Amino acid sequence: MKLLVKSKGKILLRILGSLLILSSFFYIIIFDFYAVKFDEVNWILIIIIPLTWFTFFLFQKIENKHVRRHEKLIRLAIAMIQILITVIYPLFINQVLTFYNILFIEIYELMLLIIWYFSYSIYKKLKIISLIAIIFNILFLLLFSMTSLSVLAQNFNYLLALLISILGFTLIIFIELIMKMKKEFRYR
């Protein structure tokens, strides 16, 4: 009990790091809601599907028994709907650039969710997945910035969200290392 009381502030800082990562995800969702020209398919791809993934990940984190029981089926259903829309959508639009912008946004949002989902884990392998997602988002953002004709403000907002998520991840890792040195925390 004494160890828990001493670690309370550090645990709150870990939660703050997780909330920073999550806030970067919602920042991008809100930005995309106002910045992207919407038709129904864009709205589904950019807003609804990432929020569906977020809801699924949230129910997994709080260990909802219905989600845990049907985890693979739910994950498969969401992924299949996302893939079908992503594959069929280009057949109905004339602008390839619009499709690639939407695909970028969709992947970027999902990577932010992956960073959030695995960053708070006590397992080293899951932390590495979160780190890989951060590196992927950095490279993806650089590639998109160089090849896209998008507005500078849009790239700035994605960069800001990425920096916020990196700050949150760094805060989590920093606090865990301090807790590990004091033997208050242990990776598995």
Image: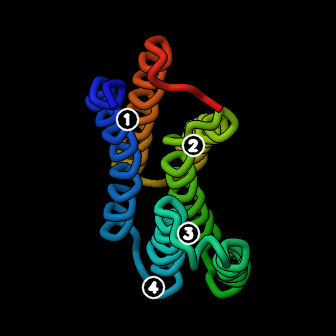
Q: Position of residue 143 (x, y in %)?
A: 61, 42
Q: Vertical placement of 137 versus 82: above or below? A: above
Q: Amino acid at mark 3?
A: Thr
Sequence-first disc among 2 and 3: 3
Sequence-first disc among 1 and 2: 1
Q: In the depicted view, which residue is nearer to us: 105 or 176?
A: 176
Q: Nearer the viewer, mark 4 or mark 3?
A: 4
**Residue receiving disc 3:** 98
Q: Which mark is residue 137?
A: 2
The local secondary structure at tag 3 comes to: helix
Q: CA distance from mark 4 to mark 1?
A: 39 Å
Q: Position of residue 67 (x, y in %)?
A: 58, 75
| Residue at left offset 66%, top offset 82% | 81
Q: Nearer the viewer, mark 2 or mark 3?
A: 2
Q: CA distance from mark 1 to mark 2?
A: 22 Å
**Residue receiving disc 4:** 39
* Badge 3: residue crowd in 10 Å (few <14, some 14–19, many ≥20): some
Q: In the depicted view, which residue is nearer to us: 141 or 37?
A: 141
Q: Is residue 98 left or right of residue 150?
A: right
**Residue receiving disc 1:** 14
Sequence-first disc among 4 and 3: 4
Q: Position of residue 157 (x, y in %)?
A: 36, 48
**Which quadrant of the figure contains the N terminus?**
top left
